[in-house]
Image (cartoon, helix red, strand yellow):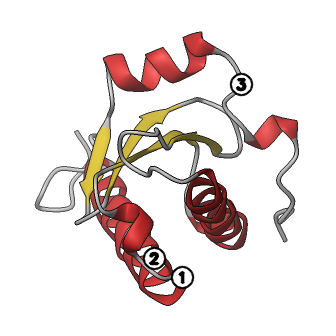
Amino acid sequence: MVSQGFGRDRRLLSSQQFQAVFDSPTHKASGKHLLLLAHANGLDHSRLGLVIGKKSVKLSVERNRIKRVIRDSFRLNQDRLGSFDLVFVARKGLGEVDNPELHDQLLQLWKRLNRQASKTVAHPIDSPDGAHA
């Protein structure tokens, strides 16, 4: 079983790591209050970064609550996510979303990411008729 911790190796720490995701996301999943950007990282695990600004969520108490919920959701779902650098970007109105609704939105974003990732993982060696090229 994959570790369900959230140590330093599971976080995006430098501006270069964030910038790589912003410059060339391989997948995007958009929700009502959150945008998820993903970039394949070549590691054996995913890493998480959060952009929850004051313009989107005014109160620090709300920003911290949202970050806690997102980190917890990532921690619980990371074994199903593959190897991506993930950045969540907050949109206006996120501060008014309660925890159960935020969990639901995050679950939908994880599902969208998994669907997109599974579509891009093709088998170029196999032709449509089953014969090898």
Name the quarter where the C terminus is drawn.
top left
Q: How far apart, in angstroms, are the residues tagged by discs 2 and 3?
A: 24 Å
Decide which of 95, 18 is in the foreground and name it: 95
Amino acid type for the residue under numbered disc 1: Asn
Q: Is residue 125 visible?
A: no
Taking the spot 54% from the left edge, 82% from the top edge, the residue there is 99
**Residue 129, percent across and down?**
11, 61
Residue at far left of view:
129
Q: What is the crowding at mark 1: few (fewer than 14 residues within 10 Å), some, or many (at least 20)?
A: few
Amino acid type for the residue under numbered disc 2: Leu
Amino acid type for the residue under numbered disc 3: Leu
Taking the spot 30% from the left edge, 66% from the top edge, the residue there is 112
Give the numbered dot on residue 102: 2
Q: Is residue 93 visible?
A: yes
Give the numbered dot on residue 99: 1
Q: How far apart, in angstroms, are the residues tagged by discs 1 and 2?
A: 5 Å
The reply to whether discs 1 and 2 touch (Cβ–Cβ < 8 Å) is yes
Name the quarter where the N terminus is drawn.
bottom right
**Residue 30, percent across and down?**
24, 56
Answer above or below: position of 18 versus 33: above
Answer above or below: position of 100 versus 90: below
Identify the mark nearer the N-term, 3 or 1: 3
- Which one is closest to the eye, mark 2 or mark 3? 2
The reply to whether discs 2 and 3 touch (Cβ–Cβ < 8 Å) is no
Give the numbered dot on residue 13: 3
Q: Is residue 33 left or right of residue 86?
A: left
Q: How far apart, in angstroms, are the residues tagged by discs 3 and 1?
A: 26 Å
Q: Is residue 118 left or right of residue 72?
A: left
**Residue 42, percent across and down?**
60, 29
Q: What is the crowding at mark 2: few (fewer than 14 residues within 10 Å), some, or many (at least 20)?
A: many
Give the numbered dot on residue 129: none
Taking the spot 70% from the left edge, 68% from the top edge, the residue there is 72
